[in-house]
Amino acid sequence: MEIYLNTNTETIRLPILPQSFERFLSTNITEDKVIGLGDIAMFNGNGLSKITLESFFPNRPYHFNTYSPVPEPYEFVVKLGVARQNGTPVRLIITGTNINRLMLITDFSYGEQDCTGDVYYTIDLIEYRPVTIPKIEDTTSSNNTNNSNRPSDTNNNS
């Protein structure tokens, strides 16, 4: 398994895989009351999926690194911090699973724990659904601005 967080300009491969991950899926359900029937539940579509990843960026080689050479820990921190701060969608890919989704980084925490220089992190991600607003075409002629054909007032009460 490999985990990638890709932007349009950066490919970030996590060097140390999280011990576990869990994807949270939700459904939008509204409850309402119907006279003579009682409570009902109405399906309103799917909620946004969420996932949290926790691991560390190594400061030195470990035998369990998923690849090498590994960039410096704070290079990862800067790239992920910029994506979070700018609201840049990242494509989360976890190979060997069905996870290949555009996500936004909602929370990103990091810090050092044991004087090794390794940077431990937690990344919270939420699914990103691009919104496209259709363009409305103007079907009227842009040259037709002549309003000279006004109806006459036939109801004079003088």
Image (tube, rainbow, N blue to C red):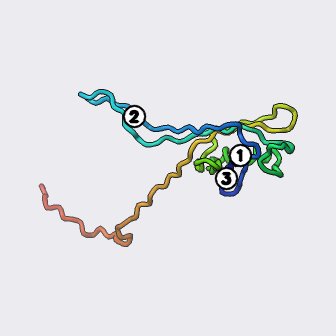
Mark 2 secondary-structure assignment? strand
In-front residue for pair 76/144: 76
Q: Dot 3, how many residues are within 10 Å of its Cα: few (below 14), some (14-19), or many (20+)?
A: some
From mark 2 to mark 1, how far is it between C-alphas?
Answer: 35 Å
Q: Earlier in the sequence, mark 2 or mark 3?
A: 3
The quarter of the image holding the C terminus is bottom left
Q: Amino acid at mark 2?
A: Thr
Instruction: State whether residue 102 appears in this view.
Output: no
Front label number (3 vs 1): 3
Q: Where in the figure is residue 95, as x and y percent of width and height?
A: 65, 50
Mark 3 secondary-structure assignment? strand
Report the residue at 79% width, 50% height from top.
67
Q: Dot 1, how many residues are within 10 Å of its Cα: few (below 14), some (14-19), or many (20+)?
A: many
Q: Please say if 100 is above or below 138.
A: above
Q: Dot 2, how many residues are within 10 Å of its Cα: few (below 14), some (14-19), or many (20+)?
A: few
Q: Earlier in the sequence, mark 3 or mark 1?
A: 3
Q: Where in the figure is residue 52, as x and y percent of width and height?
A: 64, 38
Q: Where in the figure is residue 84, as x and y percent of width and height?
A: 66, 44
Residue identifier under label 2? 30
